[in-house]
Image (spheres, rainbow, N blue to C red):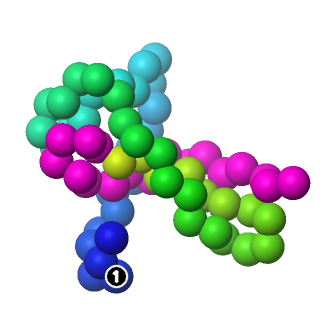
Amino acid sequence: MSSKEVVKRLTVENELSTCPECGYTDGFHVSFNMVEHKRAEVVLICPSCHKRFRIGWEVVLK
C-alpha cells in the first residue's frame, strides 16, 4: 500500500463479503497494521481490485 493511498472506511451491516468498489463477491484478504505495541488494526483487502478498507476492528496480539 502506498502512503498516499486512501483507505476507505466501511460499515459492516449483516454480512460483508462483496467489494463495494468492484463487486467481487468471494470475500476479502486480511492485513494487520500495527497501531501500538501488541495492538493492530484489521484492514480488508479485495483480492480482485486490491482496494483496502477499514472496518473499525482492532486485535490485541499476545
- Determine whether 46 is above or below 51 in the image: above
Residue 3: x %, y % from top left: 34, 82
- 32 vs 58, left or right, is left
State the residue at coordinates (40%, 41%). Answer: 29
Q: Is residue 49 magenta?
A: yes
- 40 vs 19, left or right, is right
Q: Residue furthest left?
A: 22
State the residue at coordinates (56%, 57%). Answer: 32
Magenta-colored span: 46-62
Q: Is residue 14 magenta?
A: no
State the residue at coordinates (49%, 53%). Answer: 31
Picture quadrant of residue 27:
top left
**Mark 1 residue crowding within 10 angstroms, few (<14) / some (14–19) / many (20+):** few
For the N terminus, the image quarter is bottom left
Most foreground residue, 31 or 55: 31
State the residue at coordinates (25%, 53%). Answer: 51
Query: Disc 1 marks which amino acid?
Result: Ser
Residue to which mark 1 is pinned: 3
- Determine whether 5 is above or below 28 in the image: below
